[in-house]
Amino acid sequence: MLFRKIAALMFIALVGITSISCDRPAGTPQEAAELLTAVPQWKIEEIAVNDAVTFKDGKMTQQFGGIDFQKYMETVQVKKGGEFSGIFKGESTPFVLKWQVNDQNITIGAPEGGGKGEWTVRPDDVHKDSFVMKTQSTAYDYPRMTTIALKFKAAK
């Protein structure tokens, strides 16, 4: 009887540890890059502007006085070799950017570089089935700084 209880507790602990470790975030930018390139295609799940969700479950949600996005990438691919391509809603031609691993994160920007308009992906925002990319800019609501976060999930 005692043996069965111990075996059952060990089994429950093993299942718990396994399920926790399966959804842990990447620990380094290199590990994040491996997780991102392992998924063939990512699909937009959520858009947050200044921490307010403006897109979720395939629908835009109007925010009073907020920034309204009519153009966003529905799907993206993170390819080995540094290519990041996405398809904007209603379009079929991919928009190509460049990604690269840095000391603390991954940056995504124009192929010619320059640093303006770059998006960042932190390792702790990358899981095997989802990731978040963020940017800050005054371009959307000048002169105020706007923070945008795009959450993608692995496409099925």
Image: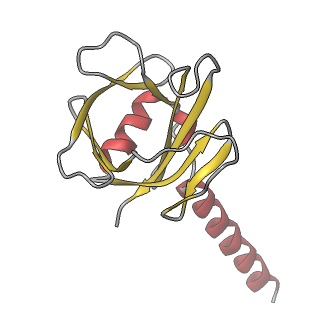
Q: Position of residue 91 (x, y in %)?
A: 24, 51
On the image, the x and y values in percent for residue 56 come to 56, 59
Q: How many marks?
A: 0
Q: Residue 106, located in which quarter of the rendered image?
A: top left
Give coordinates of residue 8: x percent, y percent: 72, 80
Q: Is residue 63 left or right of residue 43?
A: right
Q: Nearer the viewer, residue 130 or 15?
A: 130
Q: Nearer the viewer, residue 29 or 18?
A: 29
- Determine the residue positioned at 34% across, 9% down: 114
In the displayed structure, 139 sits above or below 35; it is: above
Q: Is residue 6 above or below residue 133?
A: below
Q: Nearer the viewer, residue 125 or 98?
A: 98
The reply, left or right, for residue 52 in relation to residue 88 is right
At 53% across and 65% down in the image, what residue appears?
A: 57
140, above or below 38, in the image:
above
Q: Residue furthest front?
A: 65
Give coordinates of residue 55: x percent, y percent. Answer: 55, 54
